[in-house]
Image: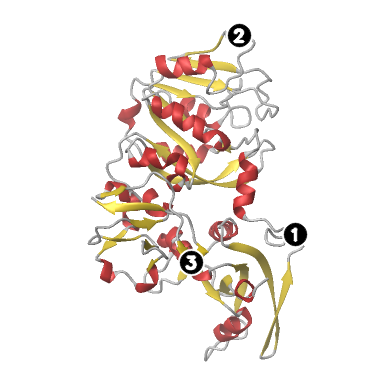
Amino acid sequence: MNNELETQFIYIIKETQLGNTCKIGVTNDIDRRLKEYNSYPGKSITNLYQCLFSAKVKDMFQLERDIKEEFSMLREKKNKEVYFYNDALFDKYVNFIKNHPLFLEETFIKVDISKDVIKIKYVKKNTPTLYERELTRKDVMQKAKKIADDEFYTRYEDIEKEINMYEKSIWKNKIVFCNCDDAIGKKQKLNDSSAFALFFIKNFKDLELKKLICIHYTSKFDLFNAGANGYIFEKDGYSEFRKDVPKTYNGSFDHPISIKILHEEADIVCTNPPFSRAIDYWKLIIESGKHFLIISNFTNSINTAFIHYFKDNLVWPGFNRVDFYLNPKRQVVQASGHWYTNIPINERPKYQNLKIMSLKDIPEKYVKLDDIGTLLVDFNYIPNNYHHPFAVSAYPILSGILEKGYKIVQEKRYTPYIKGKEKFARVLIQKI
């Protein structure tokens, strides 16, 4: 392991007697940094900073920028390096770091306090890291894409949160089609029905829907005890029933029967398609011309297979990202997802994340040129007086930059190199 990788850390610390804030920072020497914090004049030995989490990372400054961008609303107004703290937020900070491509390994920091001496020990986790296994995050993702049964079930609260952001009028007198693994049990509870089906059943009257159609996919996993066979469920007014289908019907979104429903009946498609089949699903759903609100991978906007949809304004991000799902064992698991749609969005809260300004006013550390002279801009900064293509991450796209007078100029991902070293993949955009 080279020295650069060994000495870069992200840490989360807080004072023992201060419960609602923490500090997230970077350092090459956690021992020194903690001693600095705890040696401030007047610092009480009973109220020391303690390390809650630390990790070895690559390019700690880039990761710190990404953290600040992701959690910008949780930073204190006066001191932007201090973050709000509670158990749930701490878990979100840690999960974001551990699922970031720059994460290498978690380190446990043990603090021994004896009089005025603070001793710090680094204890390596027993679980081998990706670095130790000679794997990268990309390797893991590629492996995940090969898994046929990548069944992740959306939580009710994430569906409710997103749909509540849209005007109710868009659903009025519409036929909603949930065409990816939506089982409906007899009790219509969370333990026997999918969250998508349950949400639209419970809100059928309030949304003034005309009809709900859900299809259940045949799978070796049977999360809702719905049986091994695919089926079609319909709710039409007060009537709820399963339609008769051939025994060969498997409930897949690309089965001819499912496609027929999509083209001939559906008005709005709302579901969580399998991430491993996202390319096929996006092609089918977008070419159908129907309105849709779906969950897919967080990085689709900088993935060559999907960029042309954003470039041609056939799809745009919804309001929220989705980080937590249920697996077939009903365990909460993490996967970086986001809502995508072609339903008009007139105003999105994430516009406030965009920092659109003159190039000369953007802090120098957030702009750089790669080896071929392409401008790279980070931390949601966007130059408004630069008329050549420049490269950004997925974050500005998900914050709505394409609705603010900018366009994608290349239908494939852009991978910059700086001093011969490959950097994060991006997408090229340009001021219109």
For label 2, the crowd category at 10 Å Cα-Cα, with few meaning under 14, some 14 to 19 and many 20 or more, is few
Q: Residue 431 location in percent, x, y?
A: 25, 53
Q: Residue 144 location in percent, x, y?
A: 63, 42
Q: Please give left or right for residue 378 compared with residue 251 in the image.
A: left
Q: Residue 232 location in percent, x, y?
A: 55, 16
> Is residue 161 or residue 69 the one in the foreground?
69
Amino acid at circle 3: Gln
Residue 372 visible in image: yes
**Circle 1 sits on which residue?**
127
**Circle 2 sits on which residue?**
246
Q: Earlier in the sequence, mark 3 or mark 2?
A: 3
Q: Please give left or right for residue 196 compared with residue 387 in the image.
A: right
Q: Which residue does the image show at 51% across and 67% down from the upper left?
A: 20
| SS at circle 1 | loop
Q: Which residue does the image show at 42% across and 39% down from the upper left?
A: 340
Residue 316 visible in image: no
Q: CA distance from mark 3 to mark 2?
A: 54 Å
Query: Which label is found at residue 27?
Result: none
Query: Which label is found at residue 62?
Result: 3
Would you place residue 163 above or below residue 332 in this image?
above
Q: Earlier in the sequence, mark 1 or mark 2?
A: 1
Q: Please give left or right for residue 209 compared with residue 136 in the image.
A: left
What quarter of the picture does the N terminus occupy?
Answer: bottom right
Amino acid at circle 2: Pro
Q: Earlier in the sequence, mark 1 or mark 3?
A: 3
Q: Which residue does the image show at 57% across and 8% down from the upper left?
A: 244
